[in-house]
Amino acid sequence: MAIVRMQKLSICANKKNRKAILEFLQSLGAVEIFTDAIDDEDLRRKDTQAARSSFERSADSFDKVLKLLNTYAPGEKQGMSLFAGKDPIKREDYDRVVSNIRSYLDDSTQILRDEKELTECSGLIQKDKNQIESLRPWMELGIPMSMSGTKETAVLIGSLPENCTADQLYAAAAKDLPEPVSLSADILSASNEMTCVCVVCLKRDSAKVEENLRSIGFARPSQMTDSVPRDAVKELEDDIAGQEARIETLKKQIASYAPKREDYKIAADYFRSRAEKYRVLGMLPQSERAFFLEGWVSADMADRVSKILTDQYGAYVEMADTREGETEPTILKNNRFSQAAEGVLASYGLPQHGHVDPTFIMSIFYVFFFGMMLSDAGYGLVMTIACAVILIKCPRMAAGTKKMIQLFFFCGLSTTFWGLMYGGFFGDAIDVIAKTFFGYKGDGVVKALWFEPLEDPMRLLIWCMLFGVIHLFVGLGIKGYEYLKAGDVVGFVSDIVSWYAFLMGLILMLVPSDLFSSIAGQQFNLPAIVGPISKGLAIGGLVIILLMSGRGRKNWALRIALGAYDIYGVTGWLSDVLSYSRLLALGLATGVIGNVINMMASMFGGGVVGAILFIVIFVLGHTLNIGINALGAYVHTNRLQYVEFFGKFYEAGGRPFTPFQNANKYVEIKEER
Amino acid sequence: MSLGMVFAILGAALATALAGIGSAWGVGIAGQAAAGVVSEDPDQFAKVLLLQLLPGTQGIYGLLVTFITLSRIGVLGGTAITDTHTGLMYLFACLPIAIVGLVSAYHQGRTSVSCIGLVAKKPDQFGKAMLFPAMVETYAILSLLVSILAITNI
């Protein structure tokens, strides 16, 4: 339940140790390097941009190679890959790959070249296919399409825009020709859009015939081949077959690299890490003989790091103070249960140094509220078991994913707990099964440990608001704690205690009232002494808020006005508390939809067929219900934390810690001890 | 069958129908945006799918109210209504979730569309992106509560 204390190191070292020091810091992965503050005109920064982008390109090419291998030689099982995390590799494998990095680069060049050729082949195939398509209407033609005629005759090959019969064509072409007419007009293919024709006539008539044909829309084909269409198509088809064979060869060729997949992963990560190293190298201010850097490291590691740097690398290390305007990066440290919820906090924003890390308190409420919303013992068990299986099967999951799964594991347990309290196990599955298949008649088999929400929703609504008030008061309490830690007692009394008193007073006045008892359906009799106390609290709180809220102002009129405005904030409290009614609504939704599914499943009665249909509908329906309601519970639990709870005290704005480390995407070196 | 029964079933039908229309609408427009994002960046599938589903809950709330109503007016259980008054009461009790469900699901869908755009540009801001549509849903939840409380107390 804390933010890790950070220490700033100032390091100055001999240039000849630069590589060694950077590599040590990178493999340690616990120092965030920054150099903006060091500025001196004698210091130069090395331009590493070219080297860095060359490494990035290499890493990218290996990424592409891996993607291609997955396409052409799918070897890895997918399924759990979402949670699989990085592959563990041995140090010697890493060293082997790095020492042969040239040959791996050659491999990647070759594979990418093959891929390029492959794309070209597919392009050619497409082109051929288009050409075949455009030749298809001319298939009947037995002479080359470019033929213009023989010694005595002229050949007119072309298309007409409309459907046309051989007689019509002949009549049109032979119009006004001198007798005897010697003309042959053939239709090669006809459709509504286009008629392909071949007209043969005497050379002397050709000008007249062409004119005749043009008058009915004759046009030469846009694509001419020098060969007979049938042969041209054959050629193209052969070409396609050739290209396809080439593609198969290329695919096999690429796939033949598959055994080296693991090595390519190492190579990709190697280049990525080098690019990262060169990024940092480019940041370092250097003099002729020395270089300088500053870095954030967690306070408990500072001594160890500085000792290693001093003893092994001959660097000069100083524990430096934070300068004006510098913000320390935030690392959270929590117990095993609460660290699961760190991701939830981080996606809202990390806390700043000097403020409270609310993860621990939030994680308790988070799990509690999530359980209330999903609230079904069966669903809870499904969730818990699924998360446990994933956690056991995939121990190397990325840290963020792992925390998320752990959180849902705990949420599953809480859901099971609330399911038992509300008497829900896959809705009312046990009762329905008992009645449908075992002929049980009588009251419900499963009894809620507490009560069933649908029987008495008002009662649960009041409990939900009570939980809400507790949640909000805890939030206000954290703000009070921060006031006290900063030594601001006046602020504590006027901003925190006053609100506690005011709100407690209001609640105590409300509870015994007729209005409340008619809503709750029962009368709460508090001791007589509570009446005056509650009035005292409310008025006392009210007066403090009125007078002290605007205490920063000199002008008393303005100060009172600000106080009055703050009192208006009580409506915000009302809406915040009402917002917790979602605990009831979502809890009811899960239970009732579960019941609907069970009812639909049991419609087919007992017997074997009924049982099979029951199982099918039951499994499908409840899977859907778990999905949609778990999503709802997740979203609305987050909302209660972010809007209602954090709204009372939390200011994000912390900077996440980004240490200088190996930029590994695929592999993780497992050091043998 | 009494006229009251007709009114009660009208109310039950409206709850599922109107809230369902709203959800179908909202999930539909959010789905179009989600498909666009996935076509550019398939890794965002899980995130945008969650955002797409958010406006889907109103339909479920409507179903919930319908079911509670039907199980009290003698269709799926309970006793049949004999007077018109009671039937009208059920009808009006169903209206909050029917109307607010329709409108809020549509607007939640539009908010989801914007948040899907947000996730496409800044995938790390998913936590915040999820919150904006959830804000809209609050009012569907409130109307669901009012409907349930009204029906269970008739």
Image (spheres, rainbow, N blue to C red):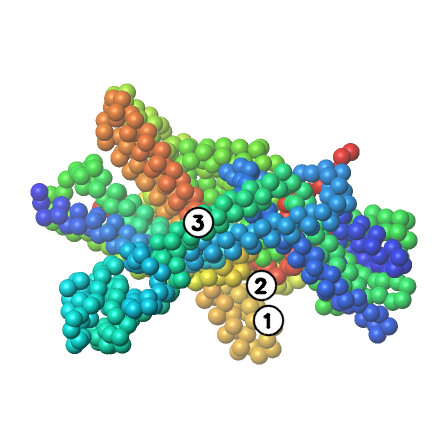
Residue bearing the label numbered 2: A494
User: Which is nearer the N-term, disc 3 or disc 1?
Assistant: 3
Residue A531 in view in this figure:
no
Asked whether A413 or A393 is in front, the reply is: A393
Q: Where in the figure is residue A376, as x and y percent of width and height?
A: 41, 36
Give the residue displayed 24% in from the left and 58% down from the top: A189
Label 2, label 3: how many angstroms apart (C-alpha)? 90 Å
Q: Same chain, marks 2 and 3? A: yes
Query: Would you say the residues marked 2 and 1 are in contact, meaning their CB atoms lie under 8 Å apart?
Result: yes
Mark 2 surroundings: few (<14), some (14-19) or many (≥20) residues within 10 A: many
The label nearer to you, 2 versus 3, is 3
Q: In this rendering, would A286 be left or right of A139?
A: right
Q: Which residue is mark 1?
A: A551
Q: Can see residue A15?
A: yes
Under circle 2, the secondary element is: helix
Amino acid type, label 1? Arg
Percent x, y for residue B33?
A: 41, 59
- Nearer-N-terminus badge (2/1): 2
Mark 2–mark 1 Cα distance, whole angstroms, equals: 9 Å
Do the residues at pointers 2 and 1 share their chain? yes
Residue type, numbered disc 2? Ser
In terms of depth relative to the viewer, which is nearer, A135 or A653? A135
